[in-house]
Image: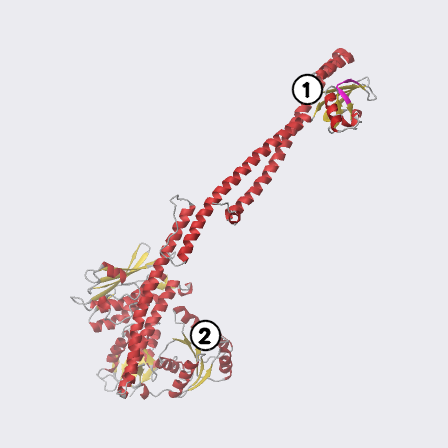
């Protein structure tokens, strides 16, 4: 069985996003702006909390990336302020503080995801793609269909073409998450967080082994790969 | 050694002593007053009783022999040494008989007890005193210098309007009061002096002790961390204080040693990959590099930095755990669920590596803890166990068990690999950055076990490594409080 490996450059990202970056570190902000532009997005940068809050309040952004420790106004206070004004734009919190309780306070303040510095850009990109406000939410769909692969969230039935596939509960949740974000890159840490609900960095490639097991179940006997590995980033479920 | 008064005054003991001295003096003064007034009252009462008896005796004499016998009795009694005061006067107050020369005017007008002490002059003993008085105050009149005494008395009026006075001099109680007062003053003075002396010697001893402790601590602050405070062996509170401080110094020295070791290890474990990183970048910059070389160099740079970041994160997490996490991070967690999660996470990896991973754990065991931290700690151990069981002689196997022993929940991971046969090595395995020689070649920061140890410490539990024959048994013991169920 051949494993399909995609290079990051081959991936067609969702349409261009309008992103607000609130980050006080000049180099970090410039790097993000440039890298996001290369990925096809438009990024606006604010270098302090107050400016960021004003921009977020007036602009119509798809995703916001907010650093926690900012001059003039703390990142969490910016988020809480926006949320209290009814702003529901998804927020990715970027922070050097990565301990368990930091993450909890960050999410409690109204953040949607939390990424610890230093981060890999591929990780950040994957996460904001998933957060993107304009990506149609598949949360309410009961049946996911990608190509000839079908997953019924109510009856827990998985079939590809005419073949019923039996999955373990965790494999089902893994496939469910991948299908919900089909066409998007899903990183190993995103999988560990969303499928296992743990936020640490596993030392060994435990996730990879789970993926290859799942892959063998859904690709065995089929000629076209559907679960792709994205080099240096993670995985993507995509038909064709 | 000179008496260092200002230094002594600066001590708490001296301040307390001064306060006590003040209180003591006040009490003593009150005591003197109380004692003297009490004794005076008693003496006055006694005096009045005596007078009453006299009056009774005189009354009997008057009844038996009328005025002549009364006068005779009075004359006789008046001549006795130390006699009471006797006086018979006519209805106009003129003195007819007795041993009283003159009286304050008005004393004889009211019958009964005089309402206050009155002044009088007595016959008989006043001639010598008068001479003395005249010598000391030349030109003074006799009336003015005649010795005046105070007395109390009973005034009676006979049926024939004659007045009889029976009284007693008050100078005796006064003298007695004076004696008591003086004796008390002397006693108190001596006590005060004694207190001062004791205070001085005790204070000086304490001061000497404290000075020696100060000297020793100054030496230690100066950098001599091996220095210790003096212990005299007396077993007193100073010794106890010194012993406790010495234990504290011991602990500081230990921590210092640990810190030194950690910084050495950081220097080694972080410098090595940083050097590698730098060398690779330098090599890639050399003239013969192709774009493939650049790519390879950059990729390995990223991989190496990721490893460095992981190491840093582990160091930070350990120090935060050791410094104490916020209690907000603790909730009721089910250890069984965590074990099942972690085992399920590692099961495919174990199967792929040919390791039998089993965890016969069911039900639920709830403790106060942090799911995330326990999950991470357990996955570190399971990860290690799978790696090391690969060197097993038979089929590699890892077994995770959970048992309750008393108030403890023991989470145990046993592998059948080569284990750590050496006791000292096993002890050291949980120290930061310690990677036993055999494992140096394995990937990892050398922080997995020390992170687990920090997690256990955070949960008020402990981590124990024991030989499993063959293999290694790692036990995480959590305290379990009764939940009242």
Q: Residues within 10 Å of mark 1 (few under 14, many from 20)?
A: few
Q: State which quadrant residue B276 falls in.
A: bottom left
Compared with B218, A235 (above or below) is below
Task: Please tell me whether mark 1 sits on a helix, a strand or a loop.
Answer: loop
Query: Is residue B98 located in the magenta-colored stretch of the structure?
Result: yes
Q: State which quadrant residue B454 falls in.
A: bottom left
Residue nearest the viewer, comparing B9 with A94: B9
Q: In this rendering, would B383 be left or right of A35?
A: left
Report the residue marked by disc 2.
A69
Q: Residues within 10 Å of mark 2 (few under 14, many from 20)?
A: some
Q: Quadrant of the N terminus of chain A?
A: bottom left
Q: Is residue B409 visible?
A: yes
**Predominant secondary structure, magenta span:** strand
Q: Report, in whole angstroms, how far the alpha carbon at label 2 lies from the one at label 1.
A: 103 Å
Work out which residue is located at the far left of the displayed protein and give it.
B394
Magenta part of the chain: B96-101
Which numbered tag is attached to residue B82?
1
Residue A14 at x, y percent in the picture: 38, 87
């Amino acid at each position: 069985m051949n494993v399909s490996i995609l290079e990051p450059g081959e991936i067609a990202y969702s349409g261009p996003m309008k992103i607000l970056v609130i980050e006080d570190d000049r180099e970090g902000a410039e790097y993000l702006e440039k890298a996001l532009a290369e990925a096809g997005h438009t990024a606006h940068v604010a270098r302090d909390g107050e400016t960021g809050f004003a921009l977020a309040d007036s602009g119509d952004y798809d995703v916001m990336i907010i650093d926690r420790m900012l001059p003039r106004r703390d990142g969490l206070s910016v988020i809480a302020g926006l949320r209290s004004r009814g702003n529901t734009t998804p927020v990715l919190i970027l922070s050097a503080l990565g301990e368990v309780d930091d993450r909890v306070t960050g999410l409690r303040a109204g953040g949607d995801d939390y990424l610890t510095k230093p981060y890999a850009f591929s990780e950040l990109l994957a996460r904001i793609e998933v957060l993107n406000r304009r990506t149609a939410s598949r949360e309410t769909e009961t049946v996911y269909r990608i190509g000839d692969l079908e997953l019924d969230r109510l009856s827990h039935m998985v079939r590809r073409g005419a073949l019923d596939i039996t999955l373990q509960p965790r494999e089902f949740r893994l496939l469910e998450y991948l299908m919900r974000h089909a066409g998007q890159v899903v990183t190993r840490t995103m999988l560990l967080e969303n499928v296992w609900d743990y936020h640490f960095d596993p030392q060994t490639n435990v996730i990879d082994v789970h993926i290859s097991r799942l892959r063998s179940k859904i690709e065995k006997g089929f000629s076209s790969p559907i679960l792709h590995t994205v080099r240096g980033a993670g995985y993507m479920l995509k038909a064709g | 050694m000179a008496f260092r008064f200002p230094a002594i005054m600066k001590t708490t003991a001296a301040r307390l002593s001064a306060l006590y001295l003040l209180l003591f003096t006040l009490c003593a003064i009150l005591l003197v007053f109380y004692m003297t007034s009490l004794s005076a009252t008693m003496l006055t009462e006694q005096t009045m009783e005596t007078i009453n008896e006299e009056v009774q005796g005189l009354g009997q004499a008057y009844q038996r022999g009328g005025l002549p016998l009364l006068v005779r009795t009075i004359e006789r009694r008046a001549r006795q040494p130390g006699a009471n005061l006797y006086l018979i006067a006519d209805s106009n107050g003129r003195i007819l008989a007795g041993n009283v020369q003159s009286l304050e005017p008005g004393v004889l007008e009211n019958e009964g007890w005089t309402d206050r002490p009155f002044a009088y002059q007595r016959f008989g003993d006043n001639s010598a005193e008068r001479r003395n008085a005249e010598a000391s105050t030349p030109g003074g009149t006799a009336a003015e210098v005649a010795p005046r005494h105070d007395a109390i008395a009973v005034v009676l009026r006979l049926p024939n309007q004659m007045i009889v006075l029976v009284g007693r001099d008050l100078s005796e109680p006064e003298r007695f009061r004076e004696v008591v007062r003086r004796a008390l003053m002397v006693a108190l003075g001596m006590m005060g002096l004694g207190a001062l002396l004791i205070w001085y010697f005790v204070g000086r001893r304490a001061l000497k002790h404290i000075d020696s402790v100060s000297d020793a601590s100054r030496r230690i602050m100066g950098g001599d961390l091996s220095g210790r405070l003096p212990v005299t062996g007396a077993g007193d509170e100073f010794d106890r204080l010194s012993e406790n401080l010495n234990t504290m110094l011991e602990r500081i020295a230990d921590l210092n040693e640990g810190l030194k070791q950690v910084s050495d290890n950081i220097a080694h474990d972080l410098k090595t990959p940083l050097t590698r990183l730098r060398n690779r970048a330098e090599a890639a910059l050399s003239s013969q590099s192709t774009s493939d070389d650049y790519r390879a160099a950059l990729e390995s740079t990223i991989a190496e930095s990721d490893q460095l970041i992981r190491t840093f994160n582990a160091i930070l997490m350990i120090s935060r755990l050791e410094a104490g996490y916020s209690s907000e991070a603790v909730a009721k967690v089910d250890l069984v669920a965590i074990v099942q999660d972690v085992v399920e996470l590692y099961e495919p990896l174990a199967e792929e590596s040919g390791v039998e991973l089993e965890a016969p754990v069911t039900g639920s065991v709830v403790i106060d803890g942090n799911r995330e931290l326990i999950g991470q700690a357990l996955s570190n151990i399971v990860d290690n166990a799978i790696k090391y069981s690969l060197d097993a002689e038979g089929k590699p196997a890892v077994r995770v068990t959970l048992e309750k022993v008393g108030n403890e929940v023991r989470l145990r991971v046993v592998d059948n690999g080569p284990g750590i046969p050496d006791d000292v090595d096993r002890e050291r395995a949980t120290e930061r950055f310690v990677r036993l020689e055999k494992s140096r070649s394995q990937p990892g920061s050398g922080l997995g076990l020390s992170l687990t140890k920090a997690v256990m410490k955070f949960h008020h539990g402990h981590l124990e490594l024991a030989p499993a024959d063959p293999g290694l048994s790692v036990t995480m013991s959590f305290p379990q409080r009764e939940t009242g169920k």
